[in-house]
């Protein structure tokens, strides 16, 4: 296979992945709309759809940017960070990560995501810098988990452990990407 044929093949594969990815995000956004037709337990307002659309669109845009990296390790690191940030923000907005949505510690969730984003901007999203930056949200997630376990919120504590693992996996993959 020539280099030109490989480039076209990679381009077709990438276009297929993009269509599936964006289609999946649109499908996720439509799920509550469909559920609302069959049950009263799902009751989204237009504002809920706007927030979900912005969040899902941000995830898609972040994946589009990350996919441009040449390194599979960098792509994987970015994917782990994007998923962790999305899950933390989504769970916090939906019901509150700890207790009800008004629990003051839930503000830490937004701080964790903000630390990852601002740290990334500070190091210009370079792999070596990102390997260090991802340790900050991991540490914040550990604190959040400790608060959750101390308050008897075992489900939130377990979720924090999972999210800590995603932040640390991201840091390790960014480290690998930095090494080439």
Image: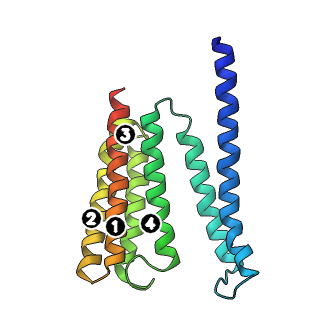
Depicted 40 relative to depicted 22: above or below: below
28 to the left or right of 131? right
How much space separates mark 2 and mark 1, taking CA atoms?
A: 7 Å
Q: Does label 3 or label 4 sit earlier along the sequence?
A: 4
Circle 2 sits in a helix, a strand or a loop, which is it? helix
- Dot 2, how many residues are within 10 Å of its Cα: few (below 14), some (14-19), or many (20+)? some
How much space separates mark 4 and mark 2, taking CA atoms?
A: 13 Å
Q: Horizontal and vertical percent for residue 84?
A: 43, 58
**Label 2 with label 1: CB-CB less than 8 Å:** yes
The residue carrying mark 1 is: 160
Circle 4 sits in a helix, a strand or a loop, which is it? helix
Residue at 37% of width from left, 79% of height from top?
A: 98
Location of the C terminus by quadrant is: top left
Name the mark on residue 88: 4
Location of residue 144 (image quadrant): bottom left
The residue carrying mark 2 is: 142
The residue carrying mark 3 is: 174
Residue at 36% of width from left, 75% of height from top?
A: 156
Depicted 176 relative to depicted 152: above or below: above
- Dot 4, how many residues are within 10 Å of its Cα: few (below 14), some (14-19), or many (20+)? many
- Dot 3, how many residues are within 10 Å of its Cα: few (below 14), some (14-19), or many (20+)? many
Q: Horizontal and vertical percent for residue 122?
A: 39, 45
Q: Horizontal and vertical percent for residue 112?
A: 37, 62
How much space separates mark 1 and mark 4, taking CA atoms?
A: 9 Å
Location of residue 152 (image quadrant): bottom left
How much space separates mark 2 and mark 3, taking CA atoms?
A: 20 Å
In this figure, what is the number of numbered marks?
Answer: 4
Location of the N terminus by quadrant is: top right
């Amino acid at each position: 296979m020539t280099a030109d044929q490989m480039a076209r093949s990679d381009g077709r594969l990438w276009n297929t992945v993009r269509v599936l990815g964006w289609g999946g995000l649109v499908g996720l956004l439509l799920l509550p709309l469909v559920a609302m037709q069959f049950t009263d337990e799902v009751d989204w307002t237009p504002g809920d759809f706007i927030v979900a659309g912005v969040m899902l669109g941000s995830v898609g845009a972040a994946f589009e940017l990350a996919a441009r990296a040449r390194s599979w390790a960098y792509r994987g690191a970015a994917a782990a960070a994007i998923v962790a940030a999305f899950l933390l923000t989504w769970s916090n907005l939906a019901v509150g990560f700890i207790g009800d949505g008004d629990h003051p510690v839930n503000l830490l969730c937004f701080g964790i995501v903000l630390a990852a984003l601002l740290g990334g901007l500070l190091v210009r999203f370079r792999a070596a810098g990102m390997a260090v930056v991802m340790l900050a949200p991991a540490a914040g997630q550990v604190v959040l988990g400790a608060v959750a376990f101390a308050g008897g919120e075992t489900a939130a504590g377990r979720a924090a452990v999972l999210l800590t693992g995603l932040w640390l996996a991201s840091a390790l993959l960014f480290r690998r990407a930095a090494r080439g």
